[in-house]
Amino acid sequence: MSEHRFQQNIKELDEMKLVGLRVQCLGDQYMSEIPKASMELQQRIDEIKQVINLSFQIGAFVVDNTTDEEDGYWVCVEVKEYENIPEGMVVLTVPSQKYAALRHIGANNMIRNSYENLHKWIEEKRLKRLKDKWHLEIYSSWQDPKNVDVLLLDTII
């Protein structure tokens, strides 16, 4: 499957309440561990109350994490309110933030190329990446690692 990129833009998102699974592993293992967590979340989705949209999974991470609480990658869904969190799942509240955005359609292992493109655009626009804030990946298609559809959201100021 070929890789498709779309035009970069800036998005501002309101606070998001997320419920899901936290992945913690060595850096080179995330590429295989995140899809496993995504499938587990999909299988357990009925356990989560007040899901806003079943069509999306949201990945969250802090690029330069400085605490154990920020270490890892969260695979989640957005909820209206936190209610009866299922066993083994976590909650994460992402504050309202401004993002540089780019949609990636293609192989999961090609997302790094899209991020490089997005980071170059951020630099060209003289924006500043906030590596110590929550960054998001909003997946509308994640079942086939060779053909994902994801909105990459890199926190900026």
Image (tube, rainbow, N blue to C red):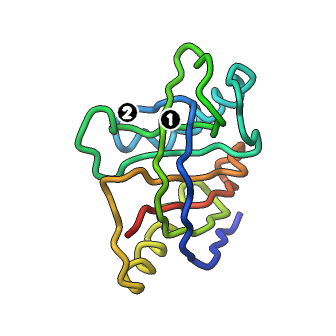
Q: What residue type is labelled 1?
A: Glu
Q: Which percent across, then down, holds residue 63?
A: 34, 52
Mark 2 secondary-structure assignment: loop
Mark 1 secondary-structure assignment: helix
Q: Which sits earlier in the primary sequence, circle 1 or circle 2? A: 2
- In this view, the residue farthest toward the bottom is 124
User: Which residue position holds label 1?
Assistant: 33
Q: In this view, does 134 lie above or below 87?
A: below
92 sits to left or right of 54: left
- Residue at image x 61%, y 35%? 38
Q: Which percent across, then down, holds residue 15?
A: 53, 48
Q: Is residue 60 above or below residue 20?
A: below
* Callouts 1 and 2 close, C-beta under 8 Å: yes
Q: Residues within 10 Å of mark 2 (few under 14, many from 20)?
A: few
Q: What residue type is labelled 2?
A: Cys
- Residue at image x 47%, y 64%? 98
Q: In which quarter of the image is the N terminus?
A: bottom right
Q: How far apart are marks 1 and 2 (CA)?
A: 8 Å
Residue 25 — which label?
A: 2
Total marks in image:
2
- In this view, the residue farthest toward the left is 66
141 sits to left or right of 86: right
38 sits to left or right of 72: right
Q: Which percent across, then down, holds residue 94?
A: 47, 45
Judge by depth and name the residue closer to the eye, 34 or 49: 49
- Residue at image x 59%, y 38%? 35
Q: Which percent across, then down, holds residue 106?
A: 66, 62
Q: In this view, does 126 lie above or below 30?
A: below
41 sits to left or right of 89: right
